[in-house]
Every structure is written in structure tokens, then in C-alpha cells.
Amino acid sequence: QVQVAESGGGSVQAGDSLRLACTAPGYTSSKRCMGWFRQSPGKEREAVAVILTDGGLAHYASSVEGRFTISQDKAKDTVYLQMDDLKSEDTAMYYCAAILRLRACPRTLGPTTESIFGDWGSGTQVTVSS
């Protein structure tokens, strides 16, 4: 189990950028995969991006492909989500999570991706005004 804490959210205008950070001490030695998720009011939580701890291979939801970039700094036990060209529909609470033990990092993200992640943080709010 890792303790996850997200930061970096805020209120921005459409077209702006934000970088979210997820600190998870010890994740590099115990978790194969980390992920960013988001939830808007009235909607289910959805997977945004995941990254393999070894090698850094990343996969994205189609809605953010080309605009968001997930990365990691293992020395700092931190996973980032760089969000560029933000849109109003990106407004949501963003969460970071670690993959459950013995689960493989998903190559495609969908409605069931959330079920294989745990150690959820409390989230950081991103609000994009058009």
C-alpha cells in the first residue's frame, strides 16, 4: 500500500495549461503502474492516463490524447500529469492511484480501468472556464 497525495489543481481559462503532481512514497519499489483519473459532477470516474513504473510507457484516454502527458520522477516518488490546451470539459476532480497487486498496467483505458487501481488520493480540483 502507498499513501498518495495529489496537488497542482486550480482554476484556469480554456487553452491554458496545468501540471498536476502525485506524490506516492515507495511506489517505485512496490507498484508496477500508476494512473490519473477524473470525475465530474454526475459522472462516473474515468481513467485519464497510466504509466508503467519500469520504462515509463504511457497510455491515454482518447479524450486527452495529444493534450495530456503523464510522466514520473522516481527520485522524487512523484507522477505528473501535464495538461495542455485545457477545455471546459476537462473540469473535474483529478485523482491519482496505484495499481492493485499482481495486476498488469492496462494498454487501453475504459470504464473498468478504475477497478484494478487502489490506494486512492483525495483528489485535486481542476476548473476550466471557457
Image: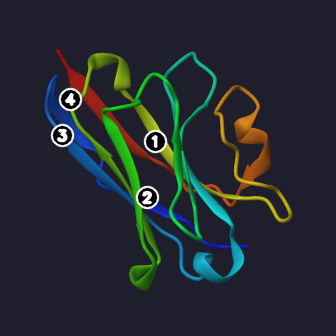
**Disc nearer the start of the sequence (3/1):** 3
Residue type (three-letter) at the residue carrying disc 1: Tyr
Q: CA distance from mark 2 to mark 4?
A: 21 Å
**Disc nearer the start of the sequence (1/2):** 2
From what the image shows, is residue 57 above or below residue 30?
above
Answer yes or no: do the residues labelled 4 and 3 have beta carbons within 8 Å?
Answer: yes
Answer yes or no: do the residues labelled 1 and 4 have beta carbons within 8 Å?
Answer: no
Q: CA distance from mark 1 to mark 4?
A: 17 Å
Q: Nearer the viewer, mark 1 or mark 4?
A: 4
Where residue 114 sits, quadrant-wise, is top right
Q: Nearer the viewer, mark 2 or mark 3?
A: 3
Q: Can you tell which mark lies on residue 120? A: none
In the picture of the structure, the residue carrying the numbered disc 2 is 6
Position of 84 compared to 58: left or right?
left
Q: Can you tell which mark lies on residue 94? A: 1
Position of 23 compared to 101: left or right?
left
Q: Nearer the viewer, mark 2 or mark 4?
A: 4
Q: CA distance from mark 1 to mark 2?
A: 8 Å
In the picture of the structure, the residue carrying the numbered disc 3 is 17
Helix, strand or loop at label 3? It is loop
Where residue 80 sits, quadrant-wise, is bottom left
Helix, strand or loop at label 4? It is loop
Helix, strand or loop at label 1? It is strand
The image position of residue 12, as x and y in percent, is 16, 33
In the picture of the structure, the residue carrying the numbered disc 4 is 85
Q: Please name whichever residue, 95 or 71, is drawn nearer the observer in this view of the structure.
A: 71
Q: CA distance from mark 2 to mark 3?
A: 17 Å
